[in-house]
Image: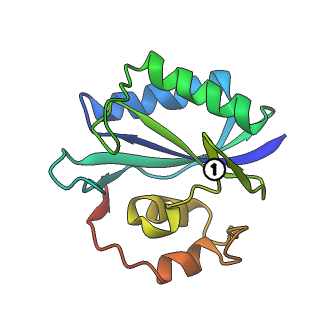
Amino acid sequence: MHSVFILLGSNLGDRLMYLHKATISIEREAGKVLQKSAVYRTESWGKADLPEYLNQVLQIESALRPQALLATLQQIEADLERKREEKWGSRTIDIDILFYDEEQINEPHLIIPHPLMQERRFVLEPLMEIAPSLEHPVFGKTVKQLYAQLKDTLIVEKI
């Protein structure tokens, strides 16, 4: 079994419902949910004129290998009406793999650890809640250390 940290995000429709349905689908199709952060209301990152997001981090235990996990998560997104129309555009649900064990993967459609997580408060704040001592395998720093160095000032708050 593999320890995987996943970020959920939604900024369209009934955002809490999409997070909830995604979590249920992940547990059914990808692996057992071991931990989940609180839900955080966050300003849009990358495109400031979009509606606010709700974000949450899950830790799951999965038997799926990274590519199979990615395919499963993308199918869950599609089942929840995710449309891939523009980069950083609004979406009903977004599911990103942050960490997969201590693996480092750099493939055209899959990069693990997530390549921008250390720049994003909306990722590190909920991750800090459930895994502050988790070490980033590329930077050799804990989530807590990455959070302390964060320059992102967008508002991220528990709901």
User: Quick one: 126 or 64, which is closer to the camera?
Assistant: 64
Residue at horizontal 58%, vertical 55%?
A: 114
How many neighbours does mark 1 have within 10 angstroms: few (below 14), some (14-19), or many (20 or more)? some
Question: At label 1, which amino acid type do we have?
Answer: Ile
Image height of 85 relative to 136, above or below: above
Image point (18%, 44%), residue name: 51
Element at label 1: strand
Q: Which residue is mark 1?
A: 111
Q: Is 124 rendered above or below residue 95?
A: below
Q: Residue pushed farthest left? A: 49
Q: Position of residue 4 (x, y in %)?
A: 69, 47
Q: Quadrant of residue 27?
A: top right
Quarter of the picture holding the N terminus: top right
Q: State left or right for residue 1 relative to residue 113.
A: right
Q: Residue at x 63, y 50 (%)?
A: 111
Residue 155 image position (x, y, % from top left): 26, 65
Color encoding of the figure: rainbow
Horizontally, residue 68 falls left or right of residue 127, namely right
